[in-house]
Image (cartoon, helix red, strand yellow):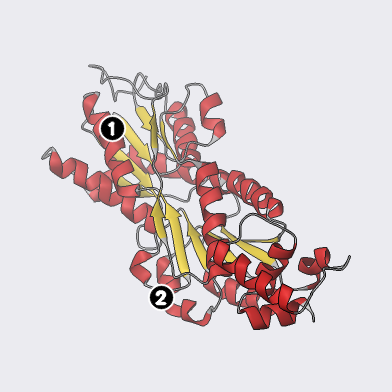
Amino acid sequence: MTIKEIARESGYAVGTVSRVLNNHPDVSDKARARVMEVVEKYHFRLNNNAKHLKQQTNSGIAIIVKGTRNMLFANMVESLQQLIKEKDYASLIYYIGEDDHEVEQALQVCRERQPLGILFLGSNLENFKERFAEVDIPCVLVTNPAASLNFENLSSVCVDDTAAAETVIEHLFALGHKRIGVLGGEITHSNPAKSRYEGCVAAFQKHEIPFDPENQFEAAYFTMEGGYEAMGNLLDKMPDLTAVFAMADVTALGAIRAAKDRGLRVPEDISIVGFDGIEIGQFMVPRLTTIRQPNEQLAARCVELLLQCIHEKTPAINEKVPFYFVEGESTAPLQNNAGSEK
């Protein structure tokens, strides 16, 4: 009797059987009872090589990261690696460009490495509509909702991007700002950018304040360079801006540099808000006002969901975790001379 044969008779995956035999805690009572029933039936005894089973079988968890310079994802990958290691699995990490097709990458990974599951950091939902039906293992979207896609093997964990963006604009309104610019990703390719954009527009509509997307919105890559260039374009179109919401902290950092290069003081002349809550923002001068996504909670829940779907074959689960508004030093009440260049 081998572990593979126990898996076949019990109806559970090899990985689940191995975890039961090695007394790991993250196995359901039902699975543990069924596996042990088969073990006792055949008087199976774990040999010295059993603990190395995962290294001998397809046991990796793949992490596909879209964007090579996203600081939020860089921090999250580190957390995910540690969590996966603690669960006694190997992590397989793949970085792709922001314009690359993450589902095609997933299909290639499945062919070459046959992982147990995949975590996607950064994703274009349109790409999933095209080819995700070809992926037959459990997957989780991190920081992006998957419920609208209706795939039984695609779960998600994210914050409410729309509500978070509304919170930012409400904060700026409360400070007296109305000439507010928005720096974001391509809303036709990025679901978080689209959701955050919709949150901004909803806040403007709620207060019956006009929002002109041609002049008040500028698309930008989620990088410092992207933020710097987009901020310059925004100021060219609206030199009297008094506040800017950047849809990523790294974009906000680039925007602050661009504002300073135009002779504007932050926050005295122009207030700037970010999104993500990456560590560097809290060490900037001024300290960045932002929306913080709970990295550790997101990472932990994504790994939990993925392993649950792998071992218990549960259908897709879509969850939202809370976001946190962090008021720093990069926003201030509107001044009479705000918006004028110094």
Count up the numbered dots. 2
| Residue named by callout 1 | 241
Q: Quadrant of residue 104?
A: bottom right
Disc 2 marks a residue whose amino acid type is Lys
Q: Compute the Cα span from label 2 to label 1.
A: 38 Å
Q: Is residue 216 above or below residue 61?
A: above
Residue marked by disc 2: 129
Which x, y percent locates residue 151? 42, 74
Q: Which quadrant does the N terminus fall into?
A: bottom right
In which image quadrant can residue 318 be found?
A: bottom left
Which element type, helix, strand or loop, lies under badge 1? loop
x 60%, y 79%: residue: 11
Instruction: Answer with left or right where residue 3 lies relative to residue 228.
Output: right
SS type, badge 2: helix
Q: Residue furthest right?
A: 48
Of tags 2 and 1, which is closer to the observer? 2
Q: In the displayed orientation, state which residue is furthest to the left.
A: 208
Residue neighbourhood size for the residue with mark 1, other residues' Cα within 10 Å, grouped as few (<14), some (14–19), many (≥20) = many
Crowd around label 2: few <14 · some 14–19 · many ≥20 (10 Å): few
**Percent position (x, y) of residue 337?**
26, 17
Residue 12 visible in rendering: yes
Q: Amino acid at mark 1?
A: Leu
Q: Locate residue 130, reporting x and y percent.
A: 43, 78
Q: Looking at this view, is 318 or 122 the one in front? A: 318
